Amino acid sequence: MTQKILNLKRYLPINHAVWLKLDLLKTLVQRNLEARYKGSVLGNLWPILNQLSQLLVYTYVFSVVLKVKLNLPDLPATNLIFGLWLFAGLIPWNAFTTGFLQASTAVIDQPNLVKKVVFPLGLLPLVPILTAFVESTMGLMLLIVFTSVTTQTIHPTILLLPLIWLPQLLLTAGLGYLTSALTVFLRDIPQTLGVILNLWFYVTPIIYPASSVPAALRPLVFWVNPFTIVIELYRDLILIGQVNHWLEWGVMSLLSLIIFYIGLSIYRRLRPAFADVL
């Protein structure tokens, strides 16, 4: 395995300094994952249990009590299918909000690294974002297994999932860079983000289908809210087996790239002042 990685490094146009930073980032993410559940009995099962508990609560409230109905191609309108559909929306949303919120305090949580050690500060917001993303893959594998058992089908479109992961990571990292830099100077930002993300959750079709949004507002939900596309694509690729939102994916990818560029640029501009404020 190590030899394969060395061969890969030889052919990719990436210089040695960047490889060193990537190695350091990988080590920090591994350490973060190990530290998060160190000493607990269930260890890395906790992220899955948390997601499953959310899934059970929302399925009970929206499918059993409120009787929200789905109309998915070739799938029955049962509570179990509703649960899988809901899980496909909660997985990327939880990865986004967990990584984003923790990234917003990544700089102020590490004053020693900022002030006393020569450390690549650009890695700080990425560590919680990638940690949350890795944790979400466990729930994703569980979803694929449950879906294949329930529907007796594994859609080949799941191979296209990396096409969503890239803009999803760019969007989260861009917002993470922006808020982590601003939080150094404005400490109210993490609390403000909690309020904003609560509102964002309910205006995104996660616990209700996008088809239930009034027709006049639906274009706004799809074209202005980038996370609507992320969630719809997860459901398209895993549950339905076809992609119905290629154009929206292209726009969302471009928007994510722009947000990443803006966030990283502001972070780099403010970075020299971090040590003076902390």
Image (cartoon, rainbow, N blue to C red):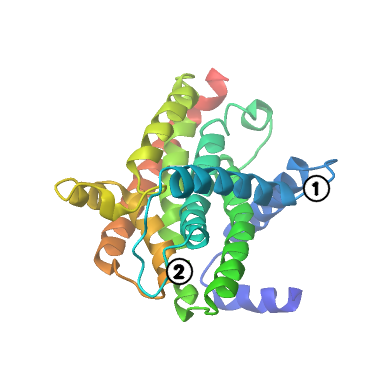
- Between 84 and 266, the one lying in front of the other is 84
The residue to which callout 1 is attached is 42
Give the amino acid type for the residue marked by disc 2 in the picture.
Leu
Q: Position of residue 119 (x, y in %)?
A: 64, 40
Residue 69 vertical placement versus 216 (above, below)? below
Mark whose residue sits in front, 1 or 2: 2
Give the class, few, some or many, for how many residues have Cα within 10 Å of label 2's Cα (few <14, many ≥20). many
The numbered mark, 1 or 2, whose residue comes first in the sequence reads 1
Residue 278 vertical placement versus 229 (above, below)? above
Residue 102 vertical placement versus 210 (above, below)? above
Cβ–Cβ under 8 Å for marks 1 and 2: no
Q: Is residue 16 visible?
A: no
Quarter of the image with the C terminus in it? top right
Give the class, few, some or many, for how many residues have Cα within 10 Å of label 1's Cα (few <14, many ≥20). few
Q: Position of residue 41 (x, y in %)?
A: 85, 45
Does dot 1 land on a helix, a strand or a loop?
A: loop
Rendered image: mark on residue 239: 2
Q: Which image quadrant is residue 269 in?
A: top left
Q: Residue at x 77, y 42 (%)?
A: 35
Q: CA distance from mark 1 to mark 2?
A: 29 Å
Does dot 2 land on a helix, a strand or a loop?
A: helix
- Between 52 and 271, the one lying in front of the other is 52
Q: Position of residue 123 (x, y in %)?
A: 58, 45
